[in-house]
Structures are given as C-alpha cells and as structure tokens.
Amino acid sequence: MISEDDSYRLIAEINTAFTPAAPINSKDLFAGRRREVEKVIGTVLQPGQHAVIYGERGVGKTSLANTLFDFLVFMGKHNYQRARLNCAHGMTFEQIWRGIFRQLTTTIDGEEVELDNTLCGDPHSEHVREVFQAMDNPSIVIIDEFDRVAGNGVETALADTIKTLADNSIETTLIVVGLADSLNQLIKEHRSIQRAIREIRMPRMSKAELVEIIDKGMAQCKGLSIAPDVKDRIADYSQGLPSITHLLAREAALQVARSLRSYIIMPDLDYAVKESVDGQLEAVLEAYRLAVSAPRGIHFKPVLLACALAPKDDHGFFYANSVTEPLRLITRKPTFNIPAFAFHLKGFCGAARGPILEKRGKQYRFIQPIMEPYVILRGLADGLIAEPQLSHPPVGSNEPEQLSLLSPSAFPGIEL
C-alpha cells in the first residue's frame, strides 16, 4: 500500500507520462521508431534533401516530427531555427508560409526581424526561396496535417518550392507530414522533385515498440510497476497504435494509484478497458453504435469484431476470406462462407453505417485505424470475447502480431 500523498504524486506523474490525446514532444518519452528517426535526421543533415512522413492516422507521425529537434540537440546540432505548422482546412499557400515565417527570424541592420514581414503578398515558390536565403542560420520547417489542404492547388506550389529550395542548396529542410494519398499527389505534381524527397513511411508500431512505450512511461512514475502479462496484453490490444497503448496504460495505472497500490495487475487492465471504451473514446463509440445498430436477428457486432481480428497487411487491408475463421469461432459454426456475411461487409462500406470500412478492389480496411482496437476492446468489455480466447505472440517472436482467436468452445455461440 502507498500513502495518499504518494497517490496524488503518482496520479500527476501518470498523466504526464501517458498522453493518449497528445503527440509526444520529448525524446525521453519517445519510444521505438529508430529506423524512422535515423531517416529523418539523415535527411536534415543532407544538403538539398527534404522529407515526407506518411502513414495511417494515429501511428505517431506527429510525435516523430515533434521530437526531431530533441534528437538533433542531443547530437550536438544546436544552430537550427525551427518552425512547425498544423495545416487547417482550406489554408492557402500564402497562409501556410505566413504562419511558418512568423516563427522564424533574421537580422537586418542589426535588428531581429520576423521573416513574415519580408514575404510579399500572393507569393510563389521563388519568393519563399528568397526569404529563406536571407536567414542567418539553417532551419527546419514541419508542415503537419498536409492532407487537410490537399486539392486546392497547394500541392503544385509546394512541389515548386521544394524544387527551387533543392536546386539552390538553400539551408532549410521541409518535413511534410500527412496521409499517403495527399503526399503521393504532392510528388506527382513535380516528378523532378523525387530526387530531393525522402519518403518515410510510418507503419503501425511493433509489439516490442509498444512495450517500450509502457516501459518508458513507467520509468517516469516513481514506485509504480506493472505485471509482465498486463504489459503484454496492453501491447496486443493496441493493434499497433501508440495512442491506445497510452490510454490503456494510463487508465490501469490511475486505477492502481486511486486504490493506494503500486503494482498493476490484470483486473486493473479489465477496468482500463471498460473505462476506455465507455468514457475516453466517446466519438468512436458513436461511430461504433451507428455501424452495428440493426433489427433483431441481424448481427453486425460479431462480423465487425471478426473484421477487427482478421489478419491484415502492412496498410491495414484484409480480404473477406480472412474474416471467415474469426467469425466461425465467434459464432461456433463449423464452417462459414463469405456470402453469409457479404451483406454486412457491404453495409459497413455504406453511408448508413458511417461508413466504417472502405473497399479497394477485393480488400477492406477500417477508415479510422483507431476503430480496429476499439472494436476489440468493445468486444472484451461487452463479453463477446474474453481474455483467455485471445492468443498473443510473445515479444520478439516471429509470429504474426495480429490478435487471433483460439478455442471455439469458449464462445457464447452467436447466431448469424
């Protein structure tokens, strides 16, 4: 047992260490992603190189960009000016650069001047180059959420800017962060910029990387520890998304601190699952309810759960036949054919149910990546599945890291 004073201290430390609603902005709390970090740093240190960081929502793209400066300082690179802009829907090329240049300065006649004041109205790529050329120090510029401005001509103007910055060896590095589709369009706008662009894909995190998040967070909480099986399960349930790891670890740890204890065990994780799906993920809950609501006898819940548990490729896509095995185990039927749930898959892709899935060719994918772990957590909280019914490859194994279902005898036998 711990004292009430220690409990309050722990609660503060837990909320600082585990931040599901905000990107990481400190190297000390940043976990995994070593290859991606090396690629971004290598880009910054290479003259004429710029980077695009892309991947699904929620995989940690912004956290990587945020912690870049910490890594550079750690390496002894202190002389960079830096600017970071979150794109808002409908922003123009000029608005983007005014927002960036308000964060950067240069010295003119002995006085420090914001670069925004040196940018002309209705600028094009050459105007941006001229402003950067007047700077005293090299700079790093992060343009985040680029997909929010794609489609209004910004791609072409930014592609032109990357080309002129690279061609003139300007001492600045642009790091553009967003979804794959918008960044592919950026590169298509100017094929000649491909030599100046380093594409850095952010896949979902491995189980070992998610465990590292927990270990780093726990190290910030003096006196708090966690059972190995709890840590293992949190990583499994997260389905590669670090925000879910932060959420489950935080809620389980807070439950322990409130109970004046210092060791996290499985019942604390059970509480964290229920608290997460009922209280912390309300926006996702509403989307889930829309997707699974149905007249009596039409069971969308087990089909959606089977989709969440289906094996997927590196981009989150799965085939309909990948749903058959988890659905067979959930419903306890000896065989399952695709026509039996094709109606459900089609419904999940329609406006009446969100849509919650998208279809590309013969493959399906959750539109919101966070929905996938949510559906599994919802299934655990609602009793559609239970912890013993899930298999979990150990950390460091070469087995697939997707959750899979075990014995059909443990399931309640939902009829479809």
Image: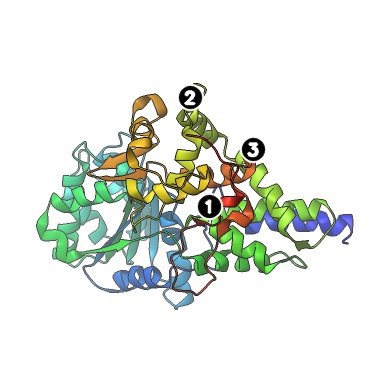
- Tell me if I can see residue 19 in this picture: no
Of 329 and 246, the residue lying toward us:
329
Q: Is mark 3 in CB contact (under 8 Å) with mark 2?
A: no
Mark 1: which amino acid?
A: Ser
Q: Nearer the viewer, residue 35 or 370?
A: 370
Q: Is residue 291 above or below residue 400?
A: above
Residue 77: % across, % down: 41, 75
Question: Which quadrant does the N terminus fall into?
Answer: bottom right
**First in residue order: circle 3 vs circle 2:** 3
**Residue 254 in the image: x percent, y percent?**
73, 52
Q: Which residue is mark 2?
A: 294
Which mark identifies residue 279? 3
User: Which circle's residue, 1 or 2, is located before the other in the chain?
Assistant: 1
Nearest the camera: 294 or 58? 294
On screen, residue 318 versus residue 275, left or right, reads left
Q: Residue furthest top?
A: 295
Q: Give the x, y percent position of residue 235.
A: 56, 61
400 is higher (above) or lower (below) than 19:
below
- Give me the C-alpha separation between circle 3 and circle 1: 15 Å
Q: Which residue is mark 1?
A: 243
The type of residue carrying mark 2 is Ala
Check if mark 3's residue and mark 1's residue have beta carbons within 8 Å: no
Measuring 68% from the left and 54% from the top, which residue is drawn there? Answer: 269
Image position, residue 379 (x, y; %) = 57, 43
